[in-house]
Image (cartoon, grey):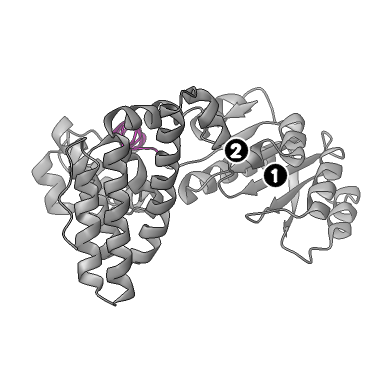
């Protein structure tokens, strides 16, 4: 069973499962999901907790010893295990073995970073999914973030006018921890309801945050203003232009390979599967290929090469100018004028 964090309270009304996997890249939602499970477990008598990290060198026998020993003061216990970005063969085998030990007096609570498609098809992931629910905790995208904020405001007894809510989404996109903190502050201020745009601008300091991979979807969608805004924020946060070049280079190379395959008569779904493109992203990629012909993609690749040359010459300012121009170039099929 796959759950989302907001579904946990309803799920727990039917009781605890013996095992949970919480995975994703959103620290606030992950911690809140873990705290929700811990609270439910304590209410049902799970008072003893053992925490481990599955980094190389972990003594797995210590986990198994803990899972098989019940203290005189607690008949139910929680084993918490934090997974690293990758599991080696030994860790995978021991984790699958551990899943088989779960019972009504032992709760296995596993947390992990964001997992790619291959990891979600691994034997250890399938073993955890068979033992209990998996909970995906990822940052809400730009479309769903206003709704998340509105629900969060409601939890604090707050309301916001539509214009104010849109500004709040802009001010905290990608930074749920800061957004949650500001809502607690707004509650203490006891401001008139509903909150207006002017009220929020007077009392809230914007703290949006992006990671480099969040630049990709707006580019593929041809959303120039949003792409440039994210690029500017990434620069302000100290992200290296070289890192963005590496990410964009891989994305452009994939798009060019896909376009060449389509021109040779292959079906999109077939080549998309060969390039390990998730089914949820395939419509976006397909729309991008329909908007950007091979010639335009090749020009964008040449522009990225110019960015690399600027970096090699330690001309950081010029490199960022190329990146801004690249964002604009994703808008449509109009040919670019590239000046060396």
> Is residue 102 or residue 233 the one in the foreground?
233
Report x, y in % for residue 162: 17, 30
Residue 285 in sight in this render:
yes
Q: Residues within 10 Å of mark 1 (few under 14, many from 20)?
A: many
Q: Quadrant of residue 246?
A: bottom left
Report helix, strand or loop for mark 2: helix
Q: Quadrant of residue 98?
A: top right
Q: Which residue in the protein does label 2 denote? A: 117
Residue under the image location 23 percent in, 38 percent down:
223
Report x, y in % for residue 294: 32, 37
Report x, y in % for residue 14: 66, 22
Marks 1 and 2: which is nearer the front? 2
Residue 190 in sight in this render:
no
User: Mainly helix, strand or loop, the magenta region?
Assistant: helix
Report x, y in % for residue 10: 56, 24
Image: magenta residue range: 140-155
Instruction: Identify the mark nearer the N-term, 1 or 2.
Output: 1
Report helix, strand or loop for mark 1: strand
Query: Is 166 drawn above or below residue 174 in the view shown?
Result: above
> Is residue 35 or residue 166 the one in the foreground?
166
Looking at the rendering, in which quadrant would you find the C terminus? bottom left
Q: CA distance from mark 1 to mark 2?
A: 21 Å
Please check the rendered image and state whether residue 47 is part of the magenta-colored stretch, yes or no. Answer: no
Looking at the rendering, in which quadrant would you find the N terminus? top right
Q: Which residue in the protein does label 1 denote? A: 109
Q: Is residue 158 left or right of residue 248?
A: left
Please check the rendered image and state whether residue 153 is part of the magenta-colored stretch, yes or no. Answer: yes
Residue under the image location 47 percent in, 28 percent down:
280
């Amino acid at each position: 069973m796959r759950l989302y964090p907001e579904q946990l309270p309803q799920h727990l009304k039917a009781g605890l499962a013996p095992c949970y996997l919480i995975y994703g890249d959103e620290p606030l939602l992950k911690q809140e999901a873990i705290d929700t499970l811990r609270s439910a477990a304590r209410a049902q008598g799970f008072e003893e907790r053992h925490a481990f990290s599955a980094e190389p060198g972990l003594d797995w026998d210590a986990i198994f010893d803990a899972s098989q020993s019940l203290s005189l003061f607690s008949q139910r216990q929680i084993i918490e295990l934090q997974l690293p970005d990758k599991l080696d063969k030994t860790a995978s085998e021991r984790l699958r073995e551990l899943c088989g030990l779960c019972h009504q007096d032992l709760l296995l609570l596993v947390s992990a970073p964001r997992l790619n498609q291959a990891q979600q098809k691994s034997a250890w992931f399938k073993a955890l999914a068979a033992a209990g629910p998996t909970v995906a905790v990822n940052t809400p995208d730009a479309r769903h973030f206003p709704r998340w904020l509105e629900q969060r405001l409601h939890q604090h007894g707050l309301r916001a006018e539509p214009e104010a809510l849109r500004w709040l989404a802009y001010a905290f996109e990608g930074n749920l921890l800061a957004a949650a903190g500001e809502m607690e502050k707004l509650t203490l201020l006891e401001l008139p309801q509903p909150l207006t745009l002017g009220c929020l601008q007077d009392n809230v300091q914007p703290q949006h945050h992006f990671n480099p991979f969040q630049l990709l979807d707006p580019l593929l969608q041809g959303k120039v203003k949003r792409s440039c805004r994210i690029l500017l924020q990434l620069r302000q946060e100290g992200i290296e232009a070289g890192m963005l070049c590496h990410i964009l280079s891989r994305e452009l190379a994939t798009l060019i390979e896909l376009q060449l395959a389509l021109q040779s008569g292959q079906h999109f779904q077939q080549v998309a599967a060969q390039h390990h493109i998730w089914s949820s992203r395939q419509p976006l990629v397909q729309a991008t290929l329909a908007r950007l012909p091979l010639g335009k993609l090749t020009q964008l690749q040449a522009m990225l090469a110019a960015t690399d040359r600027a970096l090699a010459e330690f001309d950081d300012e010029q490199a960022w100018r190329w990146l801004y121009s690249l964002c604009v170039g994703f808008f449509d099929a109009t040919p670019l004028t590239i000046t060396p």
